[in-house]
Amino acid sequence: MKLRDVGEFGLIERIERIARRAAVRGGSGSVLLGIGDDAALLRVRAGEHVAVSTDALVEGVHFRFTTQAARTIGRRALLVALSDLSAMGARPLGVTLALAAPAGLGVRAALDLARGCADVAARAGCPLVGGNLTRARVTSLTLTVLGAVPAGRAGRAGRALLRWTARPGDRVFVTGTLGGAALARVRAERLRGRLRHLPPLRLAAGRALGRLAARGACIDVSDGLVADLRHVLRASRVGAELDARRLPWPRGFRAACARLGLDPLWTALAGGEDYELLFTLRPGGPGPTALARRLGAPVTELGRITRGRALRIVGPGGRVLEGPAGYRHF
Amino acid sequence: MKLRDVGEFGLIERIERIARRAAVRGGSGSVLLGIGDDAALLRVRAGEHVAVSTDALVEGVHFRFTTQAARTIGRRALLVALSDLSAMGARPLGVTLALAAPAGLGVRAALDLARGCADVAARAGCPLVGGNLTRARVTSLTLTVLGAVPAGRAGRAGRALLRWTARPGDRVFVTGTLGGAALARVRAERLRGRLRHLPPLRLAAGRALGRLAARGACIDVSDGLVADLRHVLRASRVGAELDARRLPWPRGFRAACARLGLDPLWTALAGGEDYELLFTLRPGGPGPTALARRLGAPVTELGRITRGRALRIVGPGGRVLEGPAGYRHF
C-alpha cells in the first residue's frame, strides 16, 4: 500500500498513535500538549534555558532505502539530532518531525521511519510532539530537537556546554570509540551489505559533563575528530596537541580496516559520523576512571589544549601526523 | 553563481550574516546563543511554557520559482509558520530554518529565500537562531518556530489558545478578510502572473486574544474557513451556525471573482491559506469594535457555537449552504 492510498490524514493519525505509544514508554513529563493542535506545548522548569537544533536527512544524500532498513533510518535520524543536545549538556524536552515523501512511497516504509524515531524517542525520553507531512519527489526527514539547560550562574549561556570555552592547559577527551561509523559505511558500500551502524546516545554523558565544575568546551564528532576539534580550536582561539596512539578504536577495528585497505589511524581521526562527545576539562578535574563513571560512558584522554592556533597530532613512533601546515594525509 | 560554486560553509556564513542583521533590526532579547554552536539557546521567562510548530514548503508542491520571487517564498514560509504561534497566543522566541537545495540552485535564489525569512523574522521579532543546509534534488524550506505562552492559572496548557475549548453559546469571529489568498492563487495560475500575496502577521492579535478572560477556542485558517472550523468543532465536540452573508471579503473581491468565474462565497468559505485567526469568545465578551481595537486587527462576527455536532451555514436569502449532511457545493 502506498501513501497515495491512505492520504495525508490517514498517515498523520497512524504516526500520532506511534508517537503516543512511544511517549507512554519513554515518559513525557515535559509535554503539556502533544500532536494535534496548532503547536505543541512543553514545560520548562524555572531557571532553564531552551536549546534547539535542526537536522535534515535526505534520501540519496544521507540515506538509501536500498542499503538501510526504514526503521534504522528513523532511529539514526533522531540519534543524530539528539547528539547536538548531548553536546550542549541539555535534557531533552521533545522533537518535531517534518516528513516529506513521494506519494509512491510504501506506507510501511513511511511508518517505519516514524517508528524508528519513536524507538529512540522512548529510549531518550524525548517525545515526538509535533510535525509536518508533505508530498515531495524525494523522501526526507527534518528533525528539530528541543532541550533544556540549567541557567545557573555561569554567564549568559548558563551551564550549557559550548564550543568557544576551551583554554590552554585543558585536557582533551572523547567518549566511546572513533572510526566505527566510517568503517561501517565503507563496508556497506563495498560489500553491498546493510548499514546497521547507529550513533550512540550520549545525553546522560552530556548532562553529567555540564555539571562538572572543571568543564571546558564540548562538541559532538560529526565531521570527524580533526575537523570538529578544529571547530573548537577556532571558536576558542587556541591550539591542541593530540596523541593519535591513544585513539579509542572499536573492537576488531584494526583487522577490519586491514581487510578493506583502510588506514585505521586516519579512519578514526577523520572518518566522521561517530557522534561521540569531544570535550575539554580544566586541569585538576577527575581522572579518566572517575570521569567514565560520572559520564556513564567510556572516556579517553587524547591530549591538551595549547596556546597558539596550531593543531599537532603525534602518531606511532612519535611521527607528526598533522602540524600547523594542515592535513598531511587526506 | 550556483550553490556548488560557493560550497556549504560559504553559504552558511552568508545566511548567518543575513540572520544577524535581521536580529539587530527585529530585536533578539530571547536569544542567548544564535547560529554557530551545536544548538541555539533561548531565554524563557519564569512561568512560561514553550510552544513549537514545524512547517515545510516544497518546490513544485507549495511554491515555484517561476511564479514567485525567492524572497516572497521565504517571507511566505515564515509567515505561514508564525501563524501557528499566533493561533496559540504565543510570543515568538526564535525560528530554525532547514534549507534543502540542489547544487545547481543559484546562490542569489538561496540567499533570497533566507532574506525573505529574515525580513519577516525582523518584523515579527522572531530571530533566525539556527538551521541546517543540505543538498537535495528539489528545494525545500522547513521552518520550526518556537514561542512562549504564559502558564497562568488556566489549567495544564496555561493561557495557550486551543482548539478544543469552544462551548455552546460562544460567538464565532474571524480576523481580517477571507478568500484573498485563493483568489490570488487562481489569478496567478490563469493569468500566469507573479504570485505576490502574503499571509498576514497576527501575532499581536493572538497574544491579545490569549489575555481575554472571555477567550474560547482558536485556530488559524489554513485549509479554509469551513475545514478549519470543522477541526475546532470536532475537537470541542460542538456544532456551529454561521451567516455567510457576513463574510469579510477583501476590497474588490466580488468583481475580481466575477472576472475569473469564481463564486465569491465559496472562495471565501473554502479557499484556504488566508492564515487569519478563527476564534470563539464566551457570551458577554467585548463587542466587535472594542475587540478589533484590542486585537489590532479587523474582526468580524460570523455566528455561534451550538450544541450537537452540526455545522450550519446560511447564505443569501436565508438559503442553507451547508447543513449536517455536509458540503452542498464542493
Image (spheres, coloured by chain):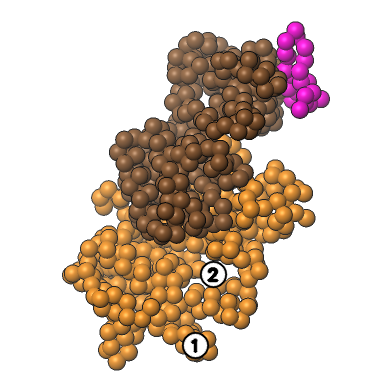
Chain colours: A brown, B orange
The residue to which callout 1 is attached is: B261
Is residue A146 something one can see in this rendering? no
Q: In the depicted view, which residue is nearer to us: B182 or A155?
A: B182
Crowding at mark 1 (Cα within 10 Å: few <14, some 14-19, many 20+): few
At x 78%, y 20%, the residue is A323
Q: Earlier in the sequence, mark 2 or mark 1?
A: 2
Is residue B114 something one can see in this rendering? yes
A318 in the magenta segment: yes
At x 72%, y 13%, the residue is A315
Element under disc 2: loop
Query: In this rendering, which labeled residue sits more in front, label 2 or label 1?
Result: 1
Numbered label tally: 2
For the residues marked 2 and 1, what is the alpha-carbon distance in whole angstroms?
Answer: 23 Å
Residue A310 lies in what quarter of the image?
top right
Instruction: Quadrant for the C terminus of chain B, please.
Output: bottom left
B76 in the magenta segment: no
Please determine whether, in this image, residue B275 is positioned above or below residue A22.
below
Element under disc 1: loop
Which segment did they paint magenta?
A306-330
| In this rendering, position of residue B16 left or right of residue A177 | right
At x 67%, y 22%, the residue is A260
Q: Pointer 1 indicates a residue of which chain? A: B
For badge 2, the amino acid type reads Leu
Please determine whether, in this image, residue A162 is positioned above or below residue B103.
above
For badge 1, the amino acid type reads Gly
Residue B190 lies in what quarter of the image?
bottom right
